[in-house]
Image (tube, rainbow, N blue to C red):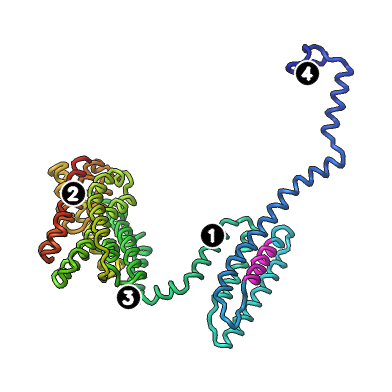
Amino acid sequence: MPHERPRWRGLRPTGPATVEEVREGDRRTAGAAAPGPGAAARAGALRLMPESLGLALRFAAALALGVMLGLERERSKPETGGFAGVRSFALISLAGALSAYFDLELAQPELALGVFAAIAAIVLVSYAVTARLGELGSTTEISALLAFLLGSLCMRGEVGLAAGLAVASGAVLALKEWLHRLAQRIERTDVEATLQFAIVTLVVLPLVPDASFGPPPLDVVNPYQIWLMVVLISGLNFASYLLVKVVGAEHGIGLTGLLGGLVSSTAVTLGFSQRSRQHPEQAPALALGILIAWSVMFVRVPLLVAVVAPPLALALAPGMLALALPGLALCAARWRRRRSAETASVRAGPNPFELGQAIRFGLLFGAVTLASKAAELAFGDAGLYLAGALAGLTDVDAIALSMGKLVSGGGASLDVAARSVVIAVIANTLLKGALAAALGAPALRRALLPALAAILAGGALGAVLL
């Protein structure tokens, strides 16, 4: 059967190929399939170039991370000198990369172990010398061993992990003074309460039954889910508690209102209202602090709901925005008009990880969830609105999380649940306004009540539009 001529597009018409054309094509194909020694060398060089470049980049990353740690340690060296600085840390990190190279590429794990032993011996000798001189700190020595390990990670291809660890450790080293001040402000009871809560959560929570209890359709009480909500709200409150501990208690009234709103806007309202009786001339500034604390709550609630039910948080956003905008606008206007120099103090309150407080919130959350479901069954949507209004008088967090749980389980629609949370926030704000009017000075009432009316009007509009 004759060979067919190759069908090259755009050339001469195809047809049977001659014997000479077939032989010429075979010779060209053989020449392409069997390159000479020069071509093989060039191909090998091209293959080696990416490998050599990658190897160089891993060594360079190890060197850079060592320099970064060394710069921080160089800055912290005493005037009399110290164990290691920027050059030593760079070399230690390179030694870590080299030891990993011995192990991975040269199959010489004993050399890698020998390099690590040599570095560790130098570190131990340095610590022994400095300890004999009365300097018992070992931060620099531990950082040197860490630099060695980071270099090893870079050579093993984990450059991203090594860089993240280097940044984190560098931040810990650089924040020495701040961390020491924080440790002085954290009391022993705080540590004990946190450990107790962690033990109960990590040991007891897995043993709690993850099942709903109660007669259908009131079977909405799930001990496991309730304790998860306790962990969530306690963790968020602990972040606020820790923030107050970090920045201290004495601040300007505006910052005090901001921090107090993270901890308890009700406590800020009570404290500032009582203070206005003692210092009537500070009433405008105290009204500003109270408005800031309320506005923080309007932002905090949807963020809390977003953790357990993101769709509800989105549905809730317009209503909470309608509440927050009047308060924020009034805060901005008062802040421009009066930049007060008066100071106030904010208490961190009890540690949110104390078991008694956590258990009380768990019981309240379970009761609000059960009451909301019962009210919905008895009165429909109006029952949820009533439950929101009543629960808002005690704790907004409990009703917000309960609505999130009902929405996630299909027990309530998004718009009804969002409206119930807005009603709870309105009821809570109305209660705090009543407390301020009853306990505060006349000047505080004159400054606060028009703002309260604007906030409630915005909240009512938001609830209607949901």
Q: In this view, does 167 lie to the left or right of 370?
A: right
In terms of secondary structure, what is the magenta stretch mainly?
helix
First in sequence: mark 3 or mark 4? 4
Q: In this view, does 4 lie to the left or right of 339?
A: right
Query: Can you say whether 209 is above or below 458 in the image?
Result: below
The residue carrying mark 2 is: 423
x, y percent for residue 200: 34, 66
The residue carrying mark 3 is: 189
Measured in 3D between alpha carbons, the distance from the residue under mark 3 to the one under mark 2, in whole angstroms, is 37 Å
The residue carrying mark 4 is: 6
Circle 3 residues within 10 Å: few <14, some 14–19, many ≥20:
few
Instruction: Give the residue displayed 30% in from the left and 70% down from the top.
Output: 251
Q: Which amino acid does label 1 sit on?
A: Gly
The disc placed on residue 377 is: none
First in sequence: mark 4 or mark 1? 4
Measured in 3D between alpha carbons, the distance from the residue under mark 4 to the one under mark 2, in whole angstroms, is 81 Å
Asked whether disc 1 touches disc 2, contact meaning CB atoms under 8 Å apart, the reply is no
